[in-house]
Image (cartoon, coloured by chain):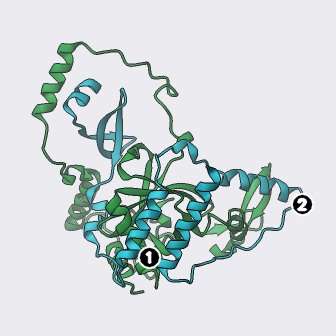
Chain colours: A cyan, B green
Amino acid sequence: MVEALQNTESEGIAHWVMRKKYYAGALRAVDDYLFLFTLRDAKEVILADDLTKPTGAAPTQKELAMAKQLVEMLEGEFKPSEYKDEYRARVEEFIEKKAKGRAPKLKAVKTKRQTAALDNVLAKSIEALRRKEKRAA
Amino acid sequence: MEPEEESAGGRPFWSGTLTFGLVSVPVSLFPASRSNRASLRMLGPDGQPLARKYFAENTGKDLDVDEVVRGYEIDKEKYVIVTDEELERLAPEKTRDIDLKQFVPADSIPPLYFERGYFLTPAAGSQKAYKLLAETMEKSGLAGIATFVMRGKEYLVAIFSDKGILRAETMRFADELRSPSDIGLPKKKAAPKPTVTKFEKLIAGKTKKQFSPTKLADKQTDSLLKLVKKKQAKRSNVVKVDEEVDTDHKVVDLVSILKKSLSGKK
């Protein structure tokens, strides 16, 4: 089945009942194994087509060019193992300390926002990344 | 994230800020899917509607939802109380911001990672920055990756841009996924050629050029609704329930909420 799906570059649509609940999904060959992905009923999903584009001011060509440059500087390969759930460990450590009556003081979360014009912020972002790259080199 | 928690009464699921470089885009998150399963209400034997309430076992006292706090069990019957504020302050850089430190080709993320989709709508005054990010990502075919904390849990998230609208997909962490060898699957051996050819022919015979989402219709819900209609027509087992007054149970039209939010109206 794996080979047949791979050779025909297709995937199957399947329906099944598991623990008295009805499911629909796709059968795919991933690497050398069969995977069954459960899918949502079409009525349950909202598509971008169902919505309207946001209104308001449009960015300028200059801003778009700078944003492109900025995003490309941050471009890389998707390496999922580089991302870790660090938060859970922080919560557990905090609880442990609090249980001993030594809860550390936590600082209030501040929201800092840019107030400068968009093109200024973009230019500064690009500059900051360049400096970082130079330091790394 | 249970469906019950989904933006009751049209409020966003989460509000925060997308950042890339030093640019910040304040946004609201709305779920991109809604449960279509027929909702069954719990009733007493004679059709009386039932309500759920918290009550303290040792005092027998009923409690309001806002009196309830959360505790973490450290020992049998011993809890440490943790407040929402503390949970937020434990990851100050992640509770309000989704910092897109990396962008990757949008089609390079295996679907195995995806959990749930959310639409992002611009907050008042951030429309231009929102459009800037949406257009840039869509043109370059890139998706932004970040981790952030929402409701006391850290999520890996990918931000996609589709038709001018930004969408977040929460993802599993790599160590949450099991590999075929983890669950003890043997290494694949090559199948006999004639069998493969036979399967290929079978597949070819059932192949459609295009995917039709109607093939995914939830037949269980449909047949349940049919049964309800039949019973209603026969007047059998129909109990009358008083008019709903509680707004939390009102059906929310997500699409119109999203449209309103995208057009900057509150």
* Callout 1 crowding tier (Cα within 10 Å): few <14, some 14–19, many ≥20: many
Tell me what residue is drawn at x 33 percent, y 62 percent. Answer: B138
Mark 2, mark 1: which one is toward the viewer?
A: 1
Decide if residue A95 is on the left or right side of residue A65: right
Tell me what residue is drawn at x 59 percent, y 65 percent. Answer: A128
Q: Position of residue A96 (x, y in %)?
A: 82, 53
* Picture layout, residue B227 above or below residue B27: above
* Picture layout, residue A6 above or below residue A16: above
Same chain check for tags 2 and 1: no
Asked whether the viewer can see residue B38, the reply is no
Residue closer to the observer: B79 or B148: B148
Image quadrant in which you'd find residue B62: bottom right
What residue occupies the far right of the structure in this picture?
A101
Image quadrant in which you'd find residue B167: bottom left
User: Which numbered disc covers residue B129?
Assistant: 1
Chain under callout 2 = A
Residue corresponding to mark 2: A101
Q: Position of residue A110 (x, y in %)?
A: 68, 76
Residue closer to the observer: A117 or B224: A117
* Callout 2 crowding tier (Cα within 10 Å): few <14, some 14–19, many ≥20: few
Q: Position of residue A117 (x, y in %)?
A: 50, 83
Q: Position of residue B254 (x, y in %)?
A: 36, 73
Residue closer to the observer: B132 or B75: B132
Q: How many marks?
A: 2
Tell me what residue is drawn at x 38 percent, y 71 percent. Answer: A64
User: Which numbered disc covers residue B69?
Assistant: none
